[in-house]
């Protein structure tokens, strides 16, 4: 018996009616099974079933084959199909807003945020100050404009811009009919804003969209005024990008006002997204194919910035619809969510001639506000000086929004989604920053000479192309250059007078020159310190690491101190980091050894993958987490979901279990003439509060044998040397210090060989690969002591390594294979020491500025390698000279503009 067809979801739509008529035609033909129809129509049963499924319009060929198999009128059905699939009317307006934010008049097609709108309205009625936070593109502006505004009796909405005071004056003037000039003079007192609003309408709600502009565009003085003014208003709602939440927190009055009065705009749920897609189309009698809805939901699932991307993709799909049906085919032709914006922008750009493209590039860059530790944002610019024809062309394509006086990007999604614009910003970033500063300086200039540029700022601005400047900018720069020449002439006159005095005070000049040299050297160190701080900041930006390395190299050439050497090596490591597991959520690097990363699933301790460092590929797996790995990487103690075991992890063995281990926790393992030696702890009480150190040996029999340890007592650390012959046991003494005992393993018994006299309180001891040195880190005293224990009966103090392991964090230690170098890793700081000579340790390098804690350390391919908690792997090089040569081969030196910015008043020195 044939299966019953699933009921249609959309019989009231054009596509649903078409599918229903196909089903009726099949009923009239005796309701043959789709398998029988397939034999007549020469299409698969699934294809014919989908044709009558109502999810998408079938092709004409499939439709006619279906009709013919059912004995229907093919000509009549071809006419019906073409009526639905007819190309859209060119003048029909899309029911979607595209990249623009929803406005108050779009409330009837604003769907998916009904619950959040109700919550915001209720909070606005209860609280005088409300904040709406969300990622760029999450729909904050649309929620404020199409969700909140239609439900308020009286509201005034605007964005702060460069001059919040002027914006307030202009908007209030439009509302009250008063003079904007008069209002501006009254509003210089922040408290006047609240007074003016109460005089007009005490129920008026000020809605401030894109509040982050007070941090990206406004001056500190304007920002402070605006915050104080808003505090005086009776009802305020602000919309803020989430990455500026910390900036808001720097203002105590905002923190207090927003306590318990915040709305977070997160990603749309699947159901909300479906309504946002289908209901605007239904409002104008159109249909969205179910296949398209499913595809769109899948393409943007979980993305906070999905709304403008979806809206734009739907606008482009609307222009490619079949009749009144938005289809999956049209969506894919438009490029989908991922490429629709880029295709639109690229198509508009390609329509311009060569000169217009250059103008368009300068226009777009004027509309970008560069982020300082945050994403780049859009900014408004005066239309004065911008090419009107090109602006209109961009506005018609909805890439740019125009008002009477200003132009701005329609949405910041254009910055993220259009590769060409991102490349322009990256290429001209520093020039763009200089140009924006010039724009603001020219706007503020009132003829005062003290406001004109001079020195490095003038030199930077003078390098800007004059074609890119507006008339006010050009006038300001010309005045600055004229004032600069006047200062030079005055300086020359002063110099002439001083020259006479110099001849009379030659001896004094010599002394002064020496002082000047000293001052210059101190100045170089100070300037280099400022540049070093900038390099550290750049190194934390994923897209700025090459710039950080170039700047760090210049800092090292200007001031070759140990600190600047470490800066160079750190920048080199961060520039060459590799993301191994950041794209694998739920996995973490647990250990690194022998060029292999042991990657553990967070939810399953028996799921461990082995990743090879050089190839970034999985080379094997283990049935448990590696608690300890032998020096030759052939043996490991693994912790599965419930037990510990000794395993052969050599490539040929494929993780073969050798024996069960009763160990409970941290262990160490070694190989001695074919015998495996394991040192660790076991719980010795039912409450699992007390642990006792144990030593076991495994001779290949499949069983481990415990070697008795006399008087384990209050021992809290136990480690075995890599050759398996010496065991270090740490005990706590009544005075808080540590007693470290050295035991020798002779066949079947352990005997006490010696003690390390009166060491500092220490953490886990660590042997060098040859067992000669034993390191005792001391977290409380920021020092690590090294002891020569080649003769356990007479341990000799070897060296003190200062400046490491403050606090209570457990340190990580890794020796080089020859034991001459050792790496000490605190949570976010790493130092490497040369310990080849007694009492003469030499610091080889220091690395810091890591954004996450160090998770594991290794030595592989002549380099120390470490991984951090965010899944990145860092290769540490110690030769500053080689690093400098490689950077010179890979990158260009700082430009003159960059040198003037980072090293003002310092004559350029050769870097490469």
Image: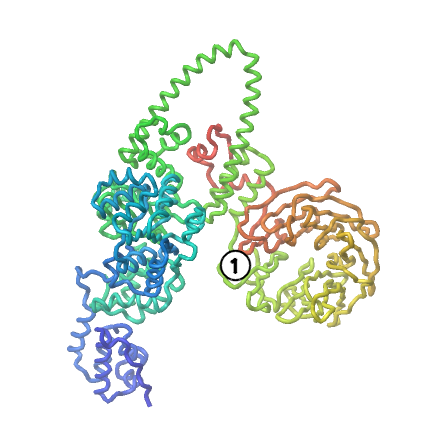
Q: Give above or below for 44 relative to 165.
A: below
Closer-to-camera residue (574/500): 500
Return the x and y of residue 101 as percentages of the image width and height.
29, 55
Q: Residue at x 21, y 69 (%)?
A: 285
Q: Residues within 10 Å of mark 1 (few under 14, many from 20)?
A: some
Quarter of the figure with residue 885: top right
Q: Secondary structure at mark 1?
A: loop
What's the colour scheme? rainbow
Closer-to-camera residue (748/649): 748
Whether residue 424 is visible here, answered yes or no, is: no
Q: Give above or below for 99 relative to 566.
A: below
In this image, 484 relative to 398: left or right?
A: right
Q: Quadrant of the N terminus?
A: bottom left
Return the x and y of residue 122 as percentages of the image width and height.
34, 62
In this image, 471 relative to 765: left or right?
A: left
Q: Residue at x 26, y 33 (%)?
A: 471
Return the x and y of residue 758 as percentages of the image width and height.
79, 49
Quarter of the figure with residue 513: top right
Closer-to-camera residue (638/614): 638
Whether residue 840 is visible here, answered yes or no, is: yes
Q: Give above or below for 540 relative to 90.
A: above
* Number of numbered labels in the structure image: 1
Return the x and y of residue 21 as percentages of the image width and height.
21, 80
- Residue occupying the far bottom of the picture: 1
Residue marked by disc 1: 581
In this image, 332 relative to 879: left or right?
A: left
């Amino acid at each position: 018996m044939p299966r019953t067809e699933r009921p249609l979801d959309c019989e009231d739509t054009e596509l649903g009616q078409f599918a229903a008529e196909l089903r009726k035609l099949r009923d009239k033909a005796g309701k043959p099974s789709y398998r029988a129809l397939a034999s007549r129509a020469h299409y698969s049963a699934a294809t014919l079933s989908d044709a009558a499924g109502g999810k998408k319009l079938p092709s004409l060929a499939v439709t006619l084959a279906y009709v013919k198999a059912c004995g229907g009128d093919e000509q009549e059905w071809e006419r019906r199909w073409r009526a639905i699939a007819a190309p859209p009317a060119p003048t029909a307006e899309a029911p979607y807003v595209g990249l623009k934010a929803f406005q108050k008049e779009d409330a009837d097609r604003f769907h998916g945020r009904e619950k959040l709108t109700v919550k915001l309205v209720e909070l606005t009625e209860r609280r005088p100050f409300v904040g709406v936070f969300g990622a760029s593109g999450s729909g904050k502006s649309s929620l404020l404009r199409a969700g909140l505004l239609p439900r308020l009796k009286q509201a005034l909405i605007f964005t702060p811009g460069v001059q919040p005071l002027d914006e307030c004056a202009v908007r209030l003037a439009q509302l009250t009919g008063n003079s904007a000039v008069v209002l501006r003079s009254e509003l210089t007192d922040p408290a006047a804003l609240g007074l003016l609003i109460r005089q007009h309408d005490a129920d008026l709600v000020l809605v401030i969209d894109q509040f982050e502009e007070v941090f990206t565009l406004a001056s500190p003085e304007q920002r402070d005024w605006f915050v104080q003014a808003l505090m005086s208003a009776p009802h305020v709602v602000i919309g803020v990008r989430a990455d500026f939440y910390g900036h808001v927190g720097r203002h105590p009055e905002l923190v207090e006002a927003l306590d318990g009065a915040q709305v977070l705009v997160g990603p749309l749920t699947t159901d909300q997204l479906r309504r946002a897609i289908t209901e605007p189309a239904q409002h104008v009698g159109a249909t969205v194919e179910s296949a398209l809805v499913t595809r769109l939901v899948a393409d943007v699932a979980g993305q906070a910035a999905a709304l403008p991307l979806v809206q734009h993709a739907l606008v482009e799909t609307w222009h490619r619809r079949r009749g009144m049906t938005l289809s999956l085919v049209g969506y894919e032709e438009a490029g989908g969510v991922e490429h629709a914006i880029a295709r639109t922008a690229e198509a508009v750009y390609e329509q311009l001639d060569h000169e217009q493209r250059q103008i368009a590039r300068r226009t777009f860059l004027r509309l970008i506000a560069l982020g300082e530790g945050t994403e780049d944002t859009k900014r408004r610019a005066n239309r004065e000086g911008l090419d009107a024809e090109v602006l209109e062309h961009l506005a018609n394509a909805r890439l740019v929004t125009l008002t009477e006086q200003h132009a701005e990007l329609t949405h910041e999604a254009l910055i993220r989604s259009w590769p060409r614009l991102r490349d322009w910003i990256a290429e001209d970033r520093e020039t763009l920053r200089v140009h924006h500063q010039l724009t603001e300086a020219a706007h503020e200039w009132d003829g005062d000479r003290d406001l004109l540029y001079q020195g490095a700022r003038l030199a930077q601005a003078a390098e800007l192309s004059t074609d890119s400047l507006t008339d006010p900018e050009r006038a300001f720069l010309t005045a600055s250059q004229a004032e600069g020449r006047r200062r030079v002439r005055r300086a020359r006159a002063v110099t002439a007078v001083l020259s006479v005095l110099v001849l009379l005070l030659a001896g004094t000049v010599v002394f002064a020159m020496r002082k000047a040299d000293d001052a210059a050297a101190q100045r170089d160190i100070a300037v280099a310190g400022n540049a070093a701080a900038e390099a550290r900041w750049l190194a934390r930006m994923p897209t700025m690491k090459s710039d950080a390395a170039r700047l760090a190299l210049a800092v090292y050439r200007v001031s070759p101190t140990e600190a600047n050497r470490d800066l160079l090596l750190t920048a080199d490591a961060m520039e060459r980091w590799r993301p191994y597991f950041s794209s694998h959520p739920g996995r973490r690097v647990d250990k690194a050894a022998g060029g292999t990363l042991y990657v553990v699933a967070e939810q399953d301790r028996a799921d461990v993958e082995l990743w090879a460092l050089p190839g970034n590929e999985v080379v094997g797996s283990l049935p448990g987490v590696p608690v300890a790995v032998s020096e030759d990487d052939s043996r490991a103690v693994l912790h599965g979901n419930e037990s510990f075991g000794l395993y052969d992890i050599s490539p040929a063995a494929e993780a073969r279990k050798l024996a069960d281990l009763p160990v409970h926790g941290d262990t160490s393992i070694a190989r001695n003439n074919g015998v495996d030696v394991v040192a660790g702890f076991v719980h010795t009480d039912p409450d699992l509060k007390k642990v006792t150190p144990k030593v076991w040996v495994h001779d290949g029999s499949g069983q481990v044998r415990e070697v008795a340890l006399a008087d384990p007592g209050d021992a809290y650390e136990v480690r075995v040397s890599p050759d398996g012959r010496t065991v270090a046991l740490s005990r706590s003494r009544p005075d808080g210090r540590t007693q470290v005992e050295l035991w020798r393993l002779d066949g079947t018994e352990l005997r006490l060989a010696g003690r390390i006299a009166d060491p500092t309180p220490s953490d886990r001891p660590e042997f060098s690969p040859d067992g000669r040195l034993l390191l005792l880190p001391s977290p409380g005293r920021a020092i690590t002591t090294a002891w020569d224990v080649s003769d356990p009966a007479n341990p000799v103090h070897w060296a003190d390594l200062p400046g490491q392991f403050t606090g209570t964090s457990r340190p990580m230690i890794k020796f080089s294979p020859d034991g001459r170098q050792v790496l000490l890793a605190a949570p976010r700081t790493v130092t490497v020491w040369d310990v080849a000579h007694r009492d003469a340790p030499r610091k080889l390098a220091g690395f810091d500025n890591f954004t996450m804690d160090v998770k594991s350390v290794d030595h592989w391919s002549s380099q120390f390698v470490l991984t951090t908690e965010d899944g990145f792997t860092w290769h540490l090089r110690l030769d500053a000279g080689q690093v400098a040569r490689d950077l010179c081969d890979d990158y260009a030196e700082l430009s003159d503009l960059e040198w003037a910015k980072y090293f003002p008043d310092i004559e350029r020195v050769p870097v490469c």
